[in-house]
Amino acid sequence: MKCPKCGFEMKKVGRIGLAVVYVCPRCNWK
């Protein structure tokens, strides 16, 4: 998955219920 803000590859950091949480290591987009 690519970050919508800067196009960097996002990292999977966990999940809340059914949603998987991604965070961008470059610009910290959640």
Image (cartoon, rainbow, N blue to C red):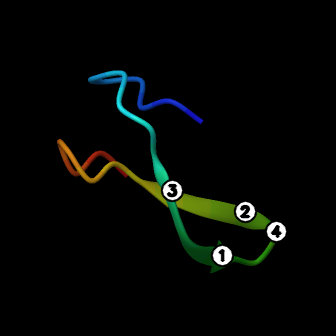
Residue under circle 2?
Answer: 19
The mark found on residue 18 in the picture is 4
- Label 1 environment density (alpha carbons within 10 Å; few <14, some 14–19, many ≥20): few
Q: Seen in the image, is 26 located left or right of residue 21?
A: left
- Contact flag, marks 1 and 4 (Cβ < 8 Å): yes
Q: Residue at image x 33%, y 48%?
A: 24
Element assignment for label 2: strand
Alpha carbon of mark 3 to alpha carbon of mark 1: how far?
9 Å
- Contact flag, marks 1 and 2 (Cβ < 8 Å): yes
Observer-nearest of 15 and 6? 6
Alpha carbon of mark 2 to alpha carbon of mark 3: how far?
9 Å
Residue under circle 1?
Answer: 15
Q: Position of residue 18 (x, y in %)?
A: 82, 68
Observer-nearest of 13 and 17? 13
Element assignment for label 1: strand
- Contact flag, marks 2 and 3 (Cβ < 8 Å): no
- Quadrant housing residue 21: bottom right
Q: Residue at image x 65%, y 77%?
A: 16
- Label 3 environment density (alpha carbons within 10 Å; few <14, some 14–19, many ≥20): some
